[in-house]
Image (spheres, rainbow, N blue to C red):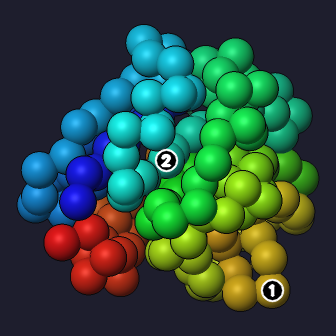
């Protein structure tokens, strides 16, 4: 098993969460800022954790946006993939965590075996999100702008769910 964590982060929040996730997971994993590596680097790993903040009105974080045309062409079949997203449910409630939905959809289309989805929408207050389907959020939903006091607990709970797939 090889584990790669790929994140895009403009102000450093998603980067810091990526580091927290690796510590909480407690296994050997490579962390990559997507700004520094091409999307093709995802091919090197059987297991992936992918994180993005959302910018603009529901857009991918800039570095993911640059990498996206290559990302959506990757073959995810046989790969175990988990997603996390950061957003602001009060300031951008109509587009909460859309970037996580965008990255999830593209990977599922190309055969990804997604774990850590079906994350409950309870405890969040937003109007709309492309990161939600009939099961719940498609990955770990975090809001450092309004609910940073809940982040640590959410990470711990989510890690318990994905851990069996990453060890
Ligand atoms: C100009 C701007 C636009 C944003 N747009 C959205 C958005 O559409 N949806 C959302 O959920 N969060 C949005 N956010 C909130 C960021 O995703 C959030 O602050 C996040 O923690 C930033 O993480 P980063 O520092 O890793 O980039 C926006 C923030 C700013 C400043």
Q: Residue at x 66, y 72 (%)?
A: 137
CA–CA distance in space, label 2 to label 1 = 21 Å
Q: Is residue 41 visible?
A: yes
Local crowd size for mark 2, using a 10 Å CA cut-off: few (<14), some (14–19), many (≥20): many
Q: Quadrant of ligand 1?
A: top right
Is residue 37 shown left or right of residue 59?
A: left
Q: Residue at x 42, y 52 (%)?
A: 49
Is residue 106 shown left or right of residue 119?
A: right
For the residue pair 76 and 139, the one nearer the viewer reads as 76
Q: Residue at x 44, y 17 (%)?
A: 37
User: What residue is shown with label 1?
Assistant: 134
The x and y percentages for residue 105 are 77, 57
Residue 146 to residue 150: above or below: above
Residue 118 to residue 101: above or below: below
Regarding mark 2 in the picture, which secondary structure is present there? Answer: strand
Q: Is residue 157 visible?
A: no
**Assess mark 1: CB under 8 A from ligand 1?**
no
Regarding mark 1 in the picture, which secondary structure is present there? Answer: loop
Residue 124 sits in quarter = bottom right
Is residue 73 shown left or right of residue 1?
A: right
For the residue pair 152 and 69, the one nearer the viewer reads as 69
The x and y percentages for residue 61 are 66, 27
The x and y percentages for residue 149 are 37, 60
User: Which quarter of the rendered picture does the C terminus lie within?
Assistant: bottom left
Local crowd size for mark 1, using a 10 Å CA cut-off: few (<14), some (14–19), many (≥20): few
User: What residue is shown with label 2?
Assistant: 50
Q: Residue at x 46, y 37 (%)?
A: 42
């Amino acid at each position: 098993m090889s584990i790669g964590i790929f994140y895009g982060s403009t102000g450093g929040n998603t980067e810091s969460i990526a580091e927290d996730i690796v510590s909480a997971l407690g296994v050997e994993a490579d962390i990559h800022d997507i700004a520094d590596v091409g999307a093709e680097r995802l091919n090197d790993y059987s297991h992936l954790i992918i994180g993005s903040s959302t910018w603009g009105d529901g857009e991918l974080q800039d570095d993911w946006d640059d990498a996206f045309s290559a990302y959506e062409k990757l073959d995810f079949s046989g790969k175990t993939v988990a997603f996390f997203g950061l957003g602001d449910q009060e300031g951008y409630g109509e587009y909460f965590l859309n970037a996580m939905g965008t990255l999830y959809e593209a990977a599922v289309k190309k055969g990804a075996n997604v774990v850590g989805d079906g994350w409950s929408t309870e405890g969040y207050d937003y109007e709309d999100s492309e990161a939600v389907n009939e099961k719940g959020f498609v990955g770990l939903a975090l809001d450092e702008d309004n609910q940073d006091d809940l982040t640590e607990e959410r990470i711990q709970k989510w890690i318990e769910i994905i851990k069996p797939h990453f060890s």
